[in-house]
Amino acid sequence: MSRTTLTKAQRIVAIVTAVTIGLAGSVFAQNTGSDPGPAVDTIYFRAFDVDRASRDLEAGNMDLYMFSLKTDAARQLEGNPSFSLYEAPASTVSILLNPAPAPRGELNPFSIREVRQAMQYLVDREFVARDIYRGMARPMISHVSPTDFDYLTISDIEQSYGIEYDPEFGRELITEAMEEAGASLENGVWSYRGRPIRITLIGRVEDERRNVADLLRVELERAGFAVSVSYRTFAAAVLSTYSTDPQVFEWHIYTEGWGRSAPSRYDYSTINTMSAPWLGNMPGWQEVGFWQYEQEELDELGQRLFRGEFASREERDDIYRRMTEISLDESVRIWVATATNSFATREDVTRVSEDLVAGIRAPWTLREAFIPGQSELTVGHLWVWTERTTWNPIGGVSDVYSSDIFRYINDPAIWNHPFTGNPEPMRLDFDVETAGPGGTLTVPGDAVLWNASRDRWDEVGSGARAVSKVTYDFSRYFQSTWHHGQPIEMADVVYSIALGFDRAYDRDKARIEVAAAVTARPFLETYRGFRILDDNRIEVYVDYWHFEDSFIASYSVPSGLSTPWEILAAMDDLVFEQRRAAYTDTAAGRFNVPWISLVMDRDARLVQRTLRTLSQSSTVPRGVFEIGGRNLVTGATARQRYEASLEWFAERGHLIVGNGPFSLWRYDPPAQYAELRAFREPNYPFRPGDWYFGEPPTLAVSSPGNVIAQAGVDEAVTVTVDGPGTVGLRYLLIDPVDRSVVTQGEAQRSGDGQFTVVLDGDETDILFPGLYELSLLAYSDAIASVAEQVVDVDVE
């Protein structure tokens, strides 16, 4: 439980830490709010082995551990007054199956959909949650965690599929499918054309997923498969799985783990990421030359959901439900559990904010946390750097070890509220106007779009229409500077927009970074125009609608402003002109060049040399800054930018230049060490207290107990819901034999927090006598979570 008390923050600020210029001198107490920036002056990130992390905390080697303790270690710290534990459903576990067809004369069992479906019944989710995680996990059937708000949307679907641990049934399905494919079971092992079928299972070793891999190996062997298990750490496992052509078969099964970053009241990202091939996270990864998993209906529905192509919440929910059904039918990912992560701090670490989903791994924790009387914190993690940790803002910062640091180096424009799950302004204010879902707005003729083939901004002209318009005000960015002292300005916004379109639509560039181009186009196609209004504001016209305006604003953000334009320009030259580096791992492998990382000396020096060349010629990227009758950058100002970044590299040895509360002072991969220092530029807009949220509110549902219902007679069940805001209650009556949903609906409100579920006599009259399950799902408009209670109903 959290030690902090719940307070209301007036503005969400999603956060990212970095090093400072103009750093305040040494102080001996935390920043109490008089100075801009975070609460402490310095944060040290160090790596600590998870198996001894609790002992390192006890020894005073760190103040806070940002990786989840193992269950036994967390339990040992419970009740110890020297420490505080913060728990959150911050990670999920899944099993990824390789569905690629084998070469002629061979057979990959998981290329057969029925075998993949059978795997659902070989996974003992209850054992994983109860025994492997010692009760600190909840079983999952789909990509939706049982406490997510969208569990309301799909809970009946999960029930109706009847997926549970039934290995005998699973083996029957496997036998039927394998024999139909021409395989035979010889001496208890499946063979194809006289050769045993061997499965390569990659199991992670850092946490409980090793035990999950062992459990899975046993079930597969019982099902007749010869299994070769390869236990690997993060970097080696990810390289073999996500960076290779599935048809090379470096893997058949991988025990995945996913960190969760923020709650979302209406998900559109997770379901696409975990199910739909178009977004590049399904086998094949949308990389050119690789075999690709394809599912046309998922892609079509996923893009509709992603791009707001629905006319109501009901239609949105219908799309979401259908995508969930297809995902379960396809069973390329088998969901196992949502793990309750236990994050530990010293007892004297105060002002800790918690996210409903991410816990203390949310982006505001280290902005606010401090130890009274001290000006620094030591933060532990499993790793600070791995061989797969890559710092570049285009195709990197994709693992928790980099992102957990990077989020304190930059201020995100918009972030989901840690309790409601709705997008809110952080450093970017917005105003939304929409004619959706049925109408359109006029796009002014002088609005522009980037022409990637001609390297210029073209006016859209008369007659252009868009569903929505969002006016963004960058004042709180532009009032301050980048960490290297240069002003944040509209040129940074404009370059980022042009860069996005260029990577996707410039034919030569799209051939180099194929996956980035292919996955970006469906999103970029919805933009209808950009118009600069003044020094701080830009209008964005977009074909996107949502029944919540804040989701329109979040979708349409033109630029995240994580890196100064001159560093982006140097990387673009290095990747696309010189062809000496790549933004993404797959492109790096294909062209045998470095996957560019701005914290690694070799890569940063490549960018440095490019910056020097651009500076010597005072290069202004062609056409980018000539927009709306303005010229945003001259040769002189461009050279000033290049020189500032060169000076930064000379002083820091890296090229991570951000705009957030901390700057990256030192990064030492061999030592597993990073040092962040507070950014106290006088005009930086935030101070301690601006992003403190405290402890999430709770939601609870309770009923008198089990119910006895007479068949054919209406039965009223009284239920109490406790929680913030306006609460509601949904119910499902489930037949436990086949998991079918007998009836479902919204409970009747009978008082303040009181609800009545009426089991209709006409419906119970046709049921066989026996026990049924009544699932009670409580929800609220103030918290993006669901609370569930299941009671027995004895129908007589």
Image (cartoon, grey):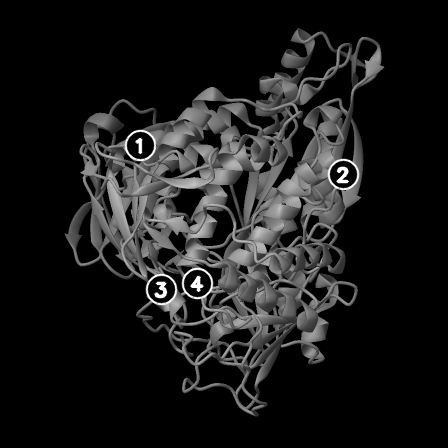
Q: Amino acid at mark 3?
A: Pro
Residue highlighted by disc 4: 14
Q: State which tag comes first along the sequence, 1 or 2.
A: 1
* CA distance separating discs 3 and 4: 19 Å
Residue at mark 3: 697
Tell me the residue that label 2 is attached to: 592
Q: How many marks?
A: 4
Element marked by disc 2: loop
Q: Do the residues under discs 4 and 2 have CB atoms within 8 angstroms?
A: no
Q: Nearer the viewer, mark 2 or mark 3?
A: 2
Seen in the image, is 42 located left or right of residue 703? right
Q: Name the one closer to the observer, 622 or 19.
A: 622
Amino acid type at circle 1 is Glu
Q: Which residue is mark 1?
A: 309
User: Which of marks 4 and 1 precedes in the sequence?
Assistant: 4
Distance from label 1 to label 3 (Cα)?
A: 33 Å
As helix, strand or loop, the secondary structure at mark 1 comes to loop
Q: Disc 2 residue type?
A: Asn
Q: Residue at x 53, y 24 (%)?
A: 330
Foreground mark, 3 or 4?
A: 4
> N-terminal of the two: label 4 or label 2?
4
Question: Alpha carbon of mark 4 to alpha carbon of mark 2: how far?
Answer: 36 Å
- Looking at the picture, how far across and down is residue 556, in whole percent? 35, 46
Circle 3/circle 4 CB separation < 8 Å = no
User: Which residue is located at x 63 percent, y 69 percent?
Assistant: 648
- Residue 109: image x %, image y %? 69, 20
Q: Is 357 positioned to the left or the right of 94 in the image?
A: left
